[in-house]
Image (cartoon, grey):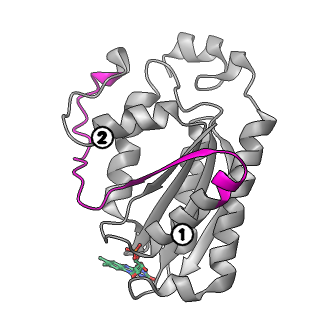
Amino acid sequence: MKILGLSCSPRKSGNTTILVNEALDGAQKEGAEIELFSLSGKEIKPCDGCQACVNTGKCHIKDDMQTLYQKLIEADGIIFGTPVYFYAMASQAKAVIDRTYALRRPTFRLVNKVGGVITVAGSLGRIDVLKDLYFNIAINHMIPADYIAATASEKGAIKSDEKTMKMAWELGREMAQLVKVGFEFPSEFRGRLSNYVTAKYKL
Ligand SMILES: Cc1cc2nc3c(=O)[nH]c(=O)nc-3n(C[C@H](O)[C@H](O)[C@H](O)COP(=O)(O)O)c2cc1C
């Protein structure tokens, strides 16, 4: 069982990464093989909308997303972590999500993976990010786990928030347990709606 922790903060060892790491620690306690993928120092270019992936399932843009694609495919559970930037997810997180278009076409490849969400704001905007990240989990037919909506501004400040740190650790444990339960979408519904509708209307 593999749990991947994706931290989309460009700030090295910032609050998002700290919480994602804490969740990974909890997942490891439940027997998961864990890995952190921090976007700090990495290059993920925006989707250019070429739509070639609709037929090939591959993205032509050569950057760190190519490594991340493989890790996302191999994971049984994925933690999406991002800071709040201007009442939305950081642009680094949005770039990753847009690029996962290539993992939805021609077939869904994130289906049945357990998805957890972590977001950190100085004060406002967390609900907007939660909403967007959970919708992304839903449209990929992933299995939703819990979320952490944390408040912290200065780098590393989240460490002194004992309750939130503990909740993040428990999120990781919960995700590993959910993977073990093995919920699955019925095979007929592993595209957009049923296979029949997906094929007929090219959804
Ligand atoms: C460009 C930028 C935009 C931000 N926008 C918001 C915001 O809209 N609302 C908020 O509460 N905090 C905002 N913040 C504060 C960060 O969410 C906060 O510092 C968070 O702890 C950063 O997480 P990190 O340490 O993982 O990078 C912003 C920070 C930056 C750098």
Q: What residue is disc 1 on?
A: 19
How far from the left and from the top, in percent, is residue 63? 20, 40
- Picture quadrant of ligand 1: bottom left
Most common secondary structure along the magenta stretch: loop
Residue at label 2?
Answer: 65
Q: Nearer the viewer, residue 34 or 188?
A: 34
Residue found at x 33% / y 16%:
56
The residue drawn where x is 69% and y is 46% is: 31
Query: Can residue 30 be seen by looking at this rendering?
Result: yes
Classify 10 Å Cα crowding around label 1: few (below 14), some (14-19), many (20 and above).
Answer: many
Asked if residue 6 is positioned above or below residue 20 in the image, the reply reads: above
Say which quarter of the image contains residue 161.
bottom right
How far across and down, in percent of the image, does residue 183 sit?
Answer: 77, 33
Mark 2: which secondary structure? helix
Question: Type of residue at label 1?
Answer: Leu
Residues shaded magenta: 26-53
Q: Residue at x 48, y 71 (%)?
A: 18
Residue extending farthest left: 62
Q: Is the residue marked 2 within 8 Å of ligand 1, measured from its CB?
A: no
Q: Tell me the kind of residue under disc 2.
A: Met
Quadrant location of residue 10? bottom left
Q: Is residue 123 visible to us here?
A: no
Q: Which quadrant is the N terminus positioned in?
A: top right
Q: Position of residue 77 (x, y in %)?
A: 60, 43
